[in-house]
Amino acid sequence: MTVLLETFELSTKAFCDVINITTQVQNVIDRSAL
């Protein structure tokens, strides 16, 4: 059970990192468009 929780936390963190990177990329694209 503990292993599942740790894996879930890692997956959640990775997912948040991807969201952050996507947001940053979107911001750069928006600036470039202007």
Image (cartoon, rainbow, N blue to C red):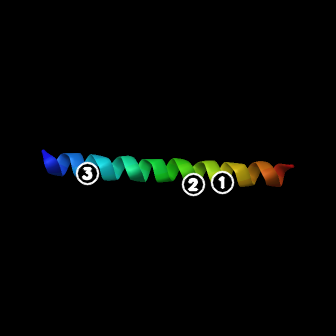
Instruction: Left or right? Give the position of 5 relative to 22.
Output: left
| Circle 2 Cα neighbour tier, 10 Å, few/some/many (<14 / 14–19 / ≥20) | few
Which label belongs to residue 21?
Answer: 2
| Circle 3 Cα neighbour tier, 10 Å, few/some/many (<14 / 14–19 / ≥20) | few
Is label 1 in a helix, a strand or a loop?
helix
Separation of disc 2 and disc 1 at Cα? 6 Å
Separation of disc 3 and disc 1 at Cα? 27 Å
Which label belongs to residue 8?
Answer: none
Q: Nearer the viewer, residue 33 or 20?
A: 20
Which numbered disc, 3 or 1, marks the residue that appears first in the sequence?
3
Which numbered disc, 3 or 2, marks the residue that appears first in the sequence?
3
Where is residue 29 shown, x and y percent of the image? 74, 52
The kind of residue on which mark 3 rests is Thr
Residue at coordinates 62% horizontally, 48% vertically from top-left? 23
| Circle 1 Cα neighbour tier, 10 Å, few/some/many (<14 / 14–19 / ≥20) | few
Where is residue 32 shown, x and y percent of the image? 81, 55
* Circles 3 and 1: CB atoms closer than 8 Å: no
* Circles 2 and 1: CB atoms closer than 8 Å: yes
Which label belongs to residue 25?
Answer: 1
Where is residue 20 shown, x and y percent of the image? 55, 50
Q: Which residue is mark 3?
A: 7
The kind of residue on which mark 1 rests is Val
* Circles 3 and 2: CB atoms closer than 8 Å: no
